[in-house]
Amino acid sequence: MEKPEVRSEDALVEIAQGKLAGNLEGDAAVFRGIPFAAPPVGERRWRAPFPPEAWEGVRSASQFSPACWQSLEYCKAVGGGDPGQFSEDCLYLNIWKPADCAGNKLPVMVWLHGGGYTIGAGGLTPYDGAGFASRGVILVSINYRLGHLGFFAHPSLEGEDPDGPLYNFALMDQIAALRWVQENISAFGGAADNVTLFGESAGGRSVLSLLASPLAAGLFHKAIVQSAYTLPDVDRNMAIKKGIAVGRHFGLENATAEQLRALPAEAFWPLEAPLNIGPAPICGDRVLPEPMLDTFFAGKQHPLPVMIGSNSDEASVLSYFGIDLAGQIDLLRREKRFGLGLIKLLYPGVKGDVELGRQVCRDMAFTTMGFVVMQAQQRIGQPCWRYYFDYVAEAERETYANGAWHGNEVPYVFDTLHLTPPACDYVTEDDLAFSARACDYWAEFARKATSSSDWLEGKLRWPACTRRRDRTMLLGVNKRAKFSIINRFMRLRMQLFKRVMRHHVKLM
């Protein structure tokens, strides 16, 4: 792995809370571990984040902060690498900017990491922002509360917040970070009126939630959604029942708020089903008064330009949730919930329950979300760029025989393939060239996309889905480096699965 030299001279910036000293690394200035909220500990657990406190003198911003409590081994295996130390005091962000951007108003991209709301951190290696900084874009990555610390409901906490019920503390953290960006990013040379919010998996799902949240209005100006899933939000009543069960698990019948807040922060993440949290926010609080999917079905999302897409082998992630792909087809066969014959007509030439299950689960759980958002954008007269990522590094094509796994696009989007194991050990010049072009599109969206845009420039001109046009950019074809525009991509499949989503019928 090649990393830029860290030069001895400090990068100095003054923000509302005080002075910060970052590092000059190659052509980028990097600021790590900046508090965007007060530590959510003690009485501040399960409350909206409080503003960060000021400091005297110059604060070092050379080290990543601890991440929220989580499974170290799970994050290392599937979450992007080693997240480092853990703490309930985790609300910090990181910034990469061009070293010399004095007086500029550069586009800003705010990254929300994935991990099913239970693992991950903003400082993981694939999310290094130097690639964006080299393209004249300021990259901000954040931590937010995970697991039960980030999503929790219990009768004893009801009525604590005078502004209304609150269960989605992780989403409130993300909103607090966006407010911090609005207040402070100009000190780094960023344009507070050109902020792109983007994320992958649970991060992409968070972007959709904030597009639907009244509390996030005006805090960002465009959005990129990578591999967000169609799983419905958790109903508040179900979340409260789970909160009660969690209290009982710790021996707290009729638990008080004080008793719950006295539990060690590290006690929650090891909880297993049915006491663990699901990978979806809770609807019915002031962050998400209505279910996110219903908001998009009704075309009531914030009116902003959106890019959205998913990967060719998203079903790769479903095994981690205990889903048997072949078993899903057998379930359709036995329960006859909607015609297996129709499914097979929509997947001509696909043989065997395993392969059919892989493609059906991929499309129902992931691909359809892009179709739904595209139609919602068209309904409100906003552009939408759809993509389908199907590139696999040359040395990995036997390993990833079915295409790009869930999350595999991230180091391409960030142009960090040369840093990210295992690809960095055998990456080729062709792999790096494709990665650079993918990152170019993301940076171009941040720089140029507006509500009146019809195109993004890049290796291949990328048209938006506007005026009832359904167009998808293939980023890679059959795992090879090719760019192609497809009209009405998987249209009949998407129409079927959208109807299934609307009624919250689940295959899984």
Image (spheres, grey):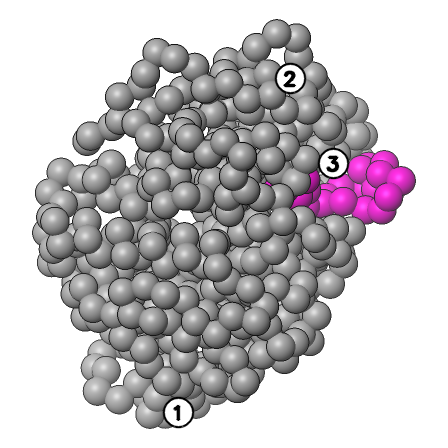
Q: Residue at x 23, y 61 (%)?
A: 391
Residue 392 percent location from the top left of the image: 20, 58
| Label 2 vs 3, first from the N-terminus | 2
Instruction: Give the labeled residue for mark 3.
Output: 48
What's the distance in space between the residues labelled 3 and 1, CA to CA? 47 Å
Secondary structure of the residue carrying numbered label 3: loop
- Judged left or right of residue 443, residue 42 is right
Task: Please tell me which residue lies in front, 279 or 276.
Answer: 279
The N terminus is located in which quarter? top left
- Judged left or right of residue 391, residue 274 is right
Instruction: Give the labeled residue for mark 1.
Output: 342
Q: Residue at x 34, y 55 (%)?
A: 440
Instruction: Give the labeled residue for mark 2.
Output: 18
- The relative height of residue 6 versus residue 256 in the rendered view (above or below) is above
Residue kind at label 1, given as amino acid type: Leu
Task: Please say whether residue 177 is one of the residues in the magenta stretch.
Answer: yes
- The relative height of residue 277 versus residue 253 in the rendered view (above or below) is below
- Judged left or right of residue 7, residue 430 is left
Residue kind at label 2, given as amino acid type: Gly
Residue kind at label 3, given as amino acid type: Ala
Nearer the camera: disc 3 or disc 1: 3
What's the distance in space between the residues labelled 1 and 2, CA to CA? 62 Å
| Label 3 vs 1, first from the N-terminus | 3
Q: Which residues are magenta?
A: 152-179
Few, some or many residues within 10 Å of mark 1 (<14, 14–19, 20+): few
Q: Residue at x 84, y 38 (%)?
A: 161
Secondary structure of the residue carrying numbered label 1: helix
Task: Please say whether residue 408 is one of the residues in the magenta stretch.
Answer: no
